[in-house]
Image: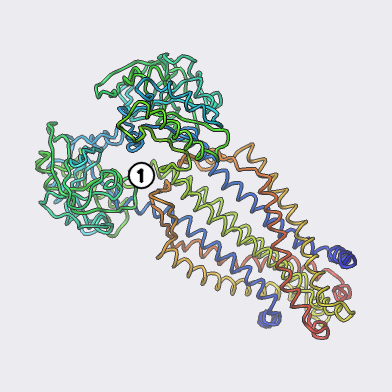
C-alpha cells in the first residue's frame, strides 16, 4: 500500500506536463464553480437582505384584513393593541417570547407627492427613527443631509435620491404631503427635506420616503395604531417557530377582551411564509439553481475528460507494470490515488484562487450599474457583492476531488483488465 | 495538401478513444453553451413579446397631451382623447398594418356580493379588431372572448381571485365619464383570462368598446390606437404614419413605438441581460478550457508519434498542418453533434419550456410567469460552431510546434 502511494507520487512527478495540464483544468473548473456560486449567491443574498429589511422583517404583525389587502395599504386596519389601547401595549407580550432582537413599528401609506407642478405616486413609511436604525444602518445610505432626528413628531422627511431628482427637490426645501386619512378625509402636512438616501435599488430610490412615525400618525389620523410591527430575531431560521409562539401569546391576551370573537385580529407572518416578492425571489433562485446545476455538470465533464484522457493515454504503461507483475487491483488503486492527488492539488488551487477572487469582489463589489448603465430591479442593489463562504470553498474542493477520483476508476479498471501483451501493443 | 488532410482524417479514426474524449468535450461544451444562451435570452425575449402582445402593440397613437399626462403622472385624462376615431382610422389604413382603438380609464371594481373593492384599469376594446392586434383571445382560461354591445367583462385570473368572483358574476365598475360626472357600469364576467404579464393579470379588465363609449360619454373618441405591423420596418412605418397625420391636420396626435413605451423596464432588462452575459461568458470559458485541455493533452501524448513521422521524412510544416486539420475536423464533428443535441434540447426548451413555478403565483420581475421558454439564437449557434472548429485547430499548433523543435531521437524516446 505504502509502496503504491510512493509510486503514485513518483508517477505524478515523472510526467510534469501531463500533471500540470490535468491539474490546471481541474483548478480552472473548480475556480469558476466557486466564482459562479459566489456571484449567484451574491445576487440572491442582496435581494433577500433588502426585502427583509424594507418589506417583511423576519416576522411581521399586521391586522388580518390589512394582510389580505396588503398591496393597497388600507389605513383603517391597524395594529393598535388588544383593546384599541395602542400598539405599545402589545410590546411586552411579544417581547416575552425568546429570541427576539428588536420590534419596530411602521406606518405605511401611499400618496401622490406633488412638488413644483410635478406629481409622483410614492410610498411613505412612518418610522421611529431610533428603532428603525437598528434594522437599516441609515448612516451608510444617506447621500445628502442627515437621517431623521430622534424625535417622533418632527416635521422632517428623508426621500430617495431618484425621487428627489424626479421631483427636482433639494435639501432644506419644504414639501406638502396631502393624503387620505384613515377616516377617508383629506389632510395635508408640510415637511422639510432633511436628508436624501440611496439604497442603490432604483425601484426603492424612486418610490420611497421616510417621516417620523408620530407625524405620520397625525397626518393619517391613525391614533395609537400602526400598520405593522416588524420583528427581527436573533436566528432568522427560527422565525417560523417564534412567530407561532407570538401568535399563541397574542391570542391568549386577546381572548381576555373579546369573549364572542374567537378569531385572532392579527396575522403573524414569518418571512418563510411571505408570498409576493418572496415567492418571486424563490422562483428567481430556482432559475439560478438550474443554471448552477448545468454549470456543475459542465465543470465535471471537464474534470472527467482530463482524468480519463490521462489514464487512457497510458495503456501501454499499464501493460508494462502488469507484465512486471502488478495485480489488477493494485493498478486500479495506483491510478485512482494518482487521480486523487492531482485533483486534490487542482481543486485546492482552484478553491483558493476562486475564493480569493470572491473575497476581493465581496469587498469591492461588481458594479452592474457602471458595467451596463442600467439598474437591477427585483430588489437587488446595483452593486453585487459575491458571497464569500468557506464552506462553499471546501465543498467545491471536495467536489473536484471526488469527481476525479471516482471517475479514474473506470478507465483504470478497463486498462487493468487488458492482457499485458495487448496493452503493450497499444500506442 | 490533399495527402495531409487524408492523413489527418485517418489519424482521427485510428485513435478512437482519444477522438471520442476530445469530441465529447467539444460537443458537451456546445450543448451547454447553446442551452444556457437560449434559456437566459429566452427570459428576456419572452418579456419583450409579452409586452408587445398584451400591452403596447408595435406602435400606438395618442393625443400628445394625453401621452404627456399619462407618462408623467400616470393619469388617463379622458378629455384629452383622440377625437373622432373613425376619421383617423380612415386616414391611416394601409396594407402593412392592423389597427385597433382602445379606451383606457381608471376605476374601482366592486363585487357587490362581498362588498370588496379594488382599483382597476379598464380597457374598452373592439372585439373584432382587437384580437388581430393584441393576443387576449389566446389566454382565455374560462368562458369566452367579448362580443360587441354586451355588458360583459374579461378579467384576469389573479384579479378574479382577489375579488372572489367567478364566471357569470356581476361586477360594478365605478368611474368618471369624460364630462367628469360619476358613472357606474354593471357588467357580467364572461371570461377569465390568464395573461403572462402579472400587471395585466392583477389590475386590468376589458369591456366592449361601444359600452365604454356610451357609458363614458366618449362620443366616438378613443384614448389610444394600437397598431400591429404585419410587415415592414418599424421606424419607416412610424415615419409614414407621422407624415400622414401631419398632412391631414392631425398634428395634435403622436405616434409612439413600444420601445419608447417600455423604456423604463427595457433598461432594467438590459442589466439583467448583462448579468446573464456574465454567466454565458463563464460557461463559454469553461467549455473552452475543457476543449483546450483535451486537445493539448492529446497532441502532447503523441510526441513519440511525431518523432516517428519526422523520422520517416515528413516536413515540419506538414506535421503542424496534419495536427491542425485533425483538430479542425474533430472540432467540426464535435460541433455538428453538439449543435444537433443542442437544437434538440432547444426544441424542448422552446416548445415545452421549463416550469419554474413554486407554490402559488409568482412573477420573476421579468414579464413572464413560471414557465420559461428558450429562443432560437442563430448568432450564438454559429458563434459556438465557428469556435468549436477554430479552438482545437489553433490549439493543436502549440504542442505540435513544441514537438517538432525536439530532436527526433529525443522525441522517439518519450514515453
A178 vs B199: above or below? above
Residue B280 x %, y %? 55, 55
In the drawing, does residue B278 fall left or right of residue B45? Answer: right
Indicate the quadrant containing the C terminus of chain B: top left, top right, bottom left or bottom right.
bottom right
**Could you say which is closer to the camera, residue B234 or residue A408?**
A408
Location of residue A121 (image quadrant): top left
Q: Is residue A288 left or right of residue A250?
A: right
> Residue at position x 43%, y 48% from top?
B364
When the figure is inspected, residue B282 is found, relative to residue A82, above or below; the finding is below
Q: Residue at x 18, y 35 (%)?
A: B80
Number of numbered tags placed on the structure image? 1
The N terminus of chain B is located in which quarter? Answer: bottom right
Picture coordinates of residue A206 (x, y %)?
Answer: 41, 31
* Rendered location of residue B144, percent (x, y): 20, 58
Is A232 situated above or below A38? above
Question: Which picture quadrant has residue B216?
Answer: top left
Can residue A166 be seen in the rendering of this structure? no
Residue A128 seen by the camera:
yes
Q: On the image, numbered disc 1 is attached to which residue?
A: B262
Indicate the position of residue B134 as horizontal and vertical percent values. Answer: 26, 54
Going 30% across and 31% down the picture, which residue do you hit?
A260
Say whether residue A66 is left or right of residue A246.
left
Nearest to the observer: residue A418 or residue B31: A418
Disc 1 crowd, CA 10 A, few/some/many (<14, 14-19, 20+): some
Residue drawn at (32%, 29%) of the image = A259
Q: Circle 1 marks a residue in which chain?
A: B
Above or below: residue A342 compared with residue A387: below
Question: Element under label 1?
Answer: loop
Amino acid at each position: 500500500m505504502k509502496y503504491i502511494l510512493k509510486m503514485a507520487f513518483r508517477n505524478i512527478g515523472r510526467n510534469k506536463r501531463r500533471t500540470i495540464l490535468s491539474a490546471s483544468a481541474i483548478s480552472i473548473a473548480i475556480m469558476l464553480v466557486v466564482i459562479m456560486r459566489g456571484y449567484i449567491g451574491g445576487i440572491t443574498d442582496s435581494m433577500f437582505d433588502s426585502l427583509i429589511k424594507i418589506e417583511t422583517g423576519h416576522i411581521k404583525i399586521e391586522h388580518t384584513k390589512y394582510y389580505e389587502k396588503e398591496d393597497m395599504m388600507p389605513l383603517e386596519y391597524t395594529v393598535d393593541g388588544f383593546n384599541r389601547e395602542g400598539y405599545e401595549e402589545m410590546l411586552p407580550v411579544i417581547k416575552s417570547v425568546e429570541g427576539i432582537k428588536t420590534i419596530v413599528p411602521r406606518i405605511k401609506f401611499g400618496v401622490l407627492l406633488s412638488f413644483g407642478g410635478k406629481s409622483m405616486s410614492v410610498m411613505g413609511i412612518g418610522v421611529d427613527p431610533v428603532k428603525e436604525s437598528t434594522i437599516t444602518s441609515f448612516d451608510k445610505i444617506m447621500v445628502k443631509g442627515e437621517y431623521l432626528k430622534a424625535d417622533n413628531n418632527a416635521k422632517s422627511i428623508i426621500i430617495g435620491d431618484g425621487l428627489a431628482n424626479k421631483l427636482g427637490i433639494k435639501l432644506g426645501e419644504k414639501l406638502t404631503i396631502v393624503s387620505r386619512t384613515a377616516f377617508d378625509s383629506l389632510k395635508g402636512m408640510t415637511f422639510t427635506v432633511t436628508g436624501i438616501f440611496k439604497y442603490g435599488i432604483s425601484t426603492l430610490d424612486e418610490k420611497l420616503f421616510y417621516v417620523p412615525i408620530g407625524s405620520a400618525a397625525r397626518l393619517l389620523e391613525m391614533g395609537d395604531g400602526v400598520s405593522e410591527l416588524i420583528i427581527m430575531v436573533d436566528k432568522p431560521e427560527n422565525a417560523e417557530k417564534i412567530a407561532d409562539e407570538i401568535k399563541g401569546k397574542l391570542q391568549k391576551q386577546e381572548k381576555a377582551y373579546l369573549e364572542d370573537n374567537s378569531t385572532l385580529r392579527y396575522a403573524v407572518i414569518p418571512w418563510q411564509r411571505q408570498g409576493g416578492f418572496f415567492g418571486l425571489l424563490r422562483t428567481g433562485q430556482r432559475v439560478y439553481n438550474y443554471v448552477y446545476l448545468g454549470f456543475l455538470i459542465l465543470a465535471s465533464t471537464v474534470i472527467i475528460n482530463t482524468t480519463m484522457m490521462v489514464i487512457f493515454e497510458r495503456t501501454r504503461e499499464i501493460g508494462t507494470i502488469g507484465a512486471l507483475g502488478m495485480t489488477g487491483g493494485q493498478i486500479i488503486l495506483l491510478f485512482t490515488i494518482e487521480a486523487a492527488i492531482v485533483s486534490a492539488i487542482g481543486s485546492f488551487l482552484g478553491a483558493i484562487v476562486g475564493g480569493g477572487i470572491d473575497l476581493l469582489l465581496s469587498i469591492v463589489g461588481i458594479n452592474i450599474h457602471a458595467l451596463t448603465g442600467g439598474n437591477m430591479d427585483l430588489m437587488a442593489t446595483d452593486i453585487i457583492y459575491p458571497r464569500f463562504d468557506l464552506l462553499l470553498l471546501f465543498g467545491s474542493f471536495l467536489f473536484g476531488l471526488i469527481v476525479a477520483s471516482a471517475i479514474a476508476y473506470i478507465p483504470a479498471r478497463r486498462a487493468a483488465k487488458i492482457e499485458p501483451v495487448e496493452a503493450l501493443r497499444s500506442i | 495538401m490533399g495527402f495531409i488532410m487524408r492523413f489527418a482524417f485517418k489519424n482521427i479514426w485510428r485513435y478512437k478513444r482519444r477522438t471520442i474524449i476530445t469530441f465529447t468535450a467539444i460537443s458537451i461544451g456546445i450543448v451547454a453553451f447553446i442551452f444556457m444562451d437560449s434559456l437566459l435570452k429566452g427570459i428576456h425575449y419572452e418579456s419583450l413579446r409579452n409586452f408587445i402582445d398584451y400591452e403596447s402593440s408595435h406602435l400606438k397613437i395618442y393625443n400628445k397631451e394625453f401621452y404627456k399626462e399619462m407618462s408623467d403622472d400616470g393619469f388617463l385624462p379622458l378629455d384629452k382623447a383622440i377625437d373622432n376615431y373613425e376619421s383617423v382610422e380612415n386616414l391611416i389604413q394601409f396594407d402593412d398594418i392592423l389597427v385597433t382603438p382602445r379606451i383606457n380609464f381608471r376605476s374601482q371594481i366592486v363585487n357587490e356580493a362581498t362588498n370588496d373593492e379594488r382599483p382597476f384599469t379598464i380597457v374598452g376594446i373592439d372585439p373584432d379588431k382587437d384580437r388581430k392586434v393584441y393576443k387576449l383571445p389566446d389566454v382565455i382560461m374560462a368562458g369566452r372572448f367579448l362580443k360587441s354591445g354586451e355588458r360583459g367583462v374579461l378579467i384576469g385570473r389573479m384579479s378574479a381571485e382577489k375579488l372572489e368572483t367567478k364566471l357569470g358574476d356581476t361586477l360594478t365598475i365605478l368611474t368618471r365619464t369624460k364630462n367628469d360626472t360619476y358613472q357606474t357600469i354593471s357588467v357580467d364576467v364572461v371570461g377569465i383570462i390568464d395573461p403572462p404579464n402579472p400587471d395585466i393579470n392583477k389590475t386590468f379588465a376589458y369591456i366592449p368598446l361601444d359600452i365604454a363609449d356610451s357609458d363614458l360619454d366618449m362620443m366616438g373618441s378613443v384614448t389610444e390606437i394600437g397598431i400591429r405591423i404585419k410587415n415592414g420596418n418599424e421606424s419607416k412605418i412610424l415615419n409614414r404614419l407621422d407624415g400622414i397625420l401631419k398632412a391631414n391636420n392631425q398634428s395634435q396626435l403622436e405616434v409612439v413605438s413600444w420601445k419608447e413605451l417600455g423604456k423604463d423596464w427595457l433598461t432594467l432588462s438590459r442589466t439583467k441581460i448583462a448579468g446573464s452575459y456574465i454567466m454565458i461568458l463563464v460557461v463559454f470559458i469553461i467549455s473552452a478550457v475543457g476543449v483546450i485541455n483535451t486537445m493539448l493533452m492529446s497532441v502532447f501524448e503523441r510526441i513519440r508519434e511525431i518523432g516517428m513521422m519526422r523520422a520517416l521524412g515528413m516536413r515540419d510544416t506538414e506535421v503542424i498542418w496534419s495536427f491542425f486539420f485533425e483538430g479542425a475536423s474533430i472540432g467540426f464533428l464535435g460541433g455538428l453533434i453538439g449543435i444537433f443535441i443542442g437544437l434538440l434540447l432547444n426544441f424542448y426548451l422552446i416548445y415545452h419550456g421549463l416550469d419554474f413555478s413554486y407554490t402559488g403565483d409568482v412573477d420573476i420581475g421579468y414579464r413572464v410567469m413560471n414557465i420559461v421558454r428558450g429562443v432560437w439564437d442563430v448568432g450564438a449557434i454559429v458563434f459556438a460552431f465557428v469556435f468549436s472548429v477554430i479552438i482545437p485547430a489553433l490549439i493543436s499548433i502549440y504542442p505540435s510546434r513544441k514537438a517538432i523543435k525536439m530532436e527526433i531521437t529525443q522525441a522517439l524516446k518519450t514515453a
